Image: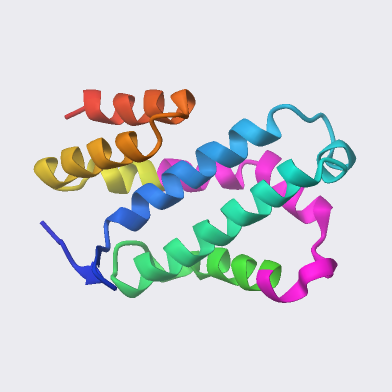
Amino acid sequence: MFKTKVNSRIAEMFLFDVFVAILKIEDTAKDYTNVQELLFNYRDWDSIIREFEIIGEAIKHLINNNLIEKEYQIVVDLRNYINHNYFGISPERIWDIIHNGDLKELLNIITVKIDKMDKELKEEMIDSFINDNKHLIFIVDRLNNLKAKL
């Protein structure tokens, strides 16, 4: 349907980038009961921060291609905050975003956008992202759930 290219990528792929990044954040964060526990595990903390960067960059491309509303610039702003504050990132702010419903809300919005995609394009992208993430069963399961709706 859209198949708008961004640097040789179909713009709709960024929807799936956000979808997968959110699932990774949720999966990583579920093992922690508070922000200090998460912060003291540098691998998991760094992983979550990286996924937030991916989300922000993808949202920027989605906005630029009119695939998501401009109001989601706030997500891009978070990415810029993370990228440019280095050691000044507020762990509590990140924890709050993960646990206050903002991340779930964004996942729901992205899922609705994916659901509205052209069926053939959506199926092709789901298969591609399943292949790319075949080692992550929790992602494959969620992508298969999207595919079941086709």
Q: Position of residue 78 (x, y in %)?
A: 63, 66
Quadrant containing the N terminus is: bottom left
Tell me which residue sits at (38%, 28%) in the image. 140
Q: Which quadrant of the view contains residue 31?
A: top right
Q: Position of residue 64 (x, y in %)?
A: 34, 74
The colour scheme used here is rainbow
Say if 150 sits above or below 59 in the image. above
Tell me which residue sits at (12%, 40%) in the image. 119
Q: Position of residue 107 (x, y in %)?
A: 47, 43
The answer to which of 9 and 115 lies nearer the viewer is 9
Q: Main secondary structure of the magenta part?
A: helix
For residue 107: magenta? yes
Q: Is residue 3 left or right of residue 22?
A: left
Q: Is residue 116 left or right of residue 104?
A: left
Q: Which quadrant of the view contains residue 24?
A: top right
The answer to which of 85 and 109 lies nearer the viewer is 85
Say if 108 sits above or below 80 in the image. above
In magenta, the rendered stretch is 83-109
Q: Is residue 92 left or right of residue 131?
A: right
Tell me which residue sits at (76%, 73%) in the image. 85
The answer to which of 147 and 140 lies nearer the viewer is 140
